[in-house]
Amino acid sequence: MATSIAPRSPDARNRILGIGLVVFSTLIFGFSNVLVKWSMTEYPVGEALFIRSVVALVLIAPFVRLRELVAAARISPGTQLLRMILTALEIGCYYWAIASLQLADVSAFYLSSPIMLTALSALVLRESVDRARWLAIAVGFAGVLVALRPSAHAVSLPACLALLGSAMYAVILTTTRSLRRTPNRVLVVLQLFSVTVAGAVAMPFAWVTPTWPALLVLSVVGVISISGSILLNRALQLAPASVVAPFQYASIIWAIVFGYAFFGDIPDLALLAGATIIIAAGLFILFRERMAIAASPVSVTPV
């Protein structure tokens, strides 16, 4: 009697793919942050949000069917609405904070979100979070503090907004995980729609007519936001939030690279040391997930 060997657990492989997508999304959002930082020195928050979101919405809307939106509204309507509202508020907080504070301070506040996400995944999503993942989260956050060293001047209204935005971001990722059965493109369209509305509401209070190069840059931010959101949403559909959370710390790596490439920022020893700690924490989780694949049972089915 012949036998066939079934592939190893698809859940374990999905976790590895989810981790890869999160790391790639941090790369994309890292480049977007360079453009956002520049645009916030020239243009009001509402205007920047509106332009980037309209461009992104125009690009992705043709791929979404009305029946998909109706179906999403019928399934967990409260969660969908909460996610949309928090998305608009969180992006507004981030843009406001990045216009008023040093990028390092804003990043330090926002990189506290993986810890919040891990806690929410355990409390709200009922995901199993073992000690190793908690340890990796804590070590990664310690690396962030070593690398960025938030200044004492960060205690201000913009800093409070950044911290609030970080908390909302963790809730957004949690709701995204809970809505993982909703098509990815639908999740992105709903996010973009909420930000477009928020930008339109704020835009009349301040307007600076953009030049053509500036309009192009803001449009590129919109395109990037689609790509990053699709990757991040897909990662949370594939893998538990507590698994992918530590890899959001990879954003500090891209901050070092893009800071040097675009602004001539040379990382100091503290920044390099912190980045090394962050990478080690992420590699630890990745190693454990790869070991899980290797240890997953292989079923043998009679033919």
Image: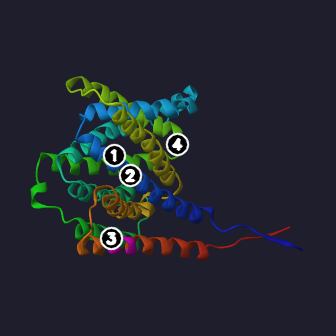
Q: Identify the residue at horizontal 86%, vertical 67% (top origin).
A: 303
The span from disc 2 to disc 3 (Cα, nearest Å) is: 18 Å
The span from disc 4 to disc 3 (Cα, nearest Å) is: 31 Å
Say which of marks 1 and 3 sits in front: 1
Residue furthest right as drawn = 1
- N-terminal label among 4 and 2: 2
The span from disc 4 to disc 2 (Cα, nearest Å) is: 22 Å
- N-terminal label among 4 and 1: 1
Say which mark, if any, is on residue 184.
Answer: 4
Say which of marks 2 and 3 sits in front: 2
Where is residue 291? Give x, y as percent.
55, 76
Say which of marks 4 and 3 sits in front: 3
Q: Is residue 224 magenta?
A: no
Assess whether mark 3 and mark 4 are in contact (beta carbons under 8 angstroms): no
Task: Please give the residue where the numbered disc 2 appears in the rendered image.
Answer: 31
Helix, strand or loop at mark 3:
helix
Residue type at the position of mark 2: Phe
- Inspect this view and state whether residue 81 appears: no
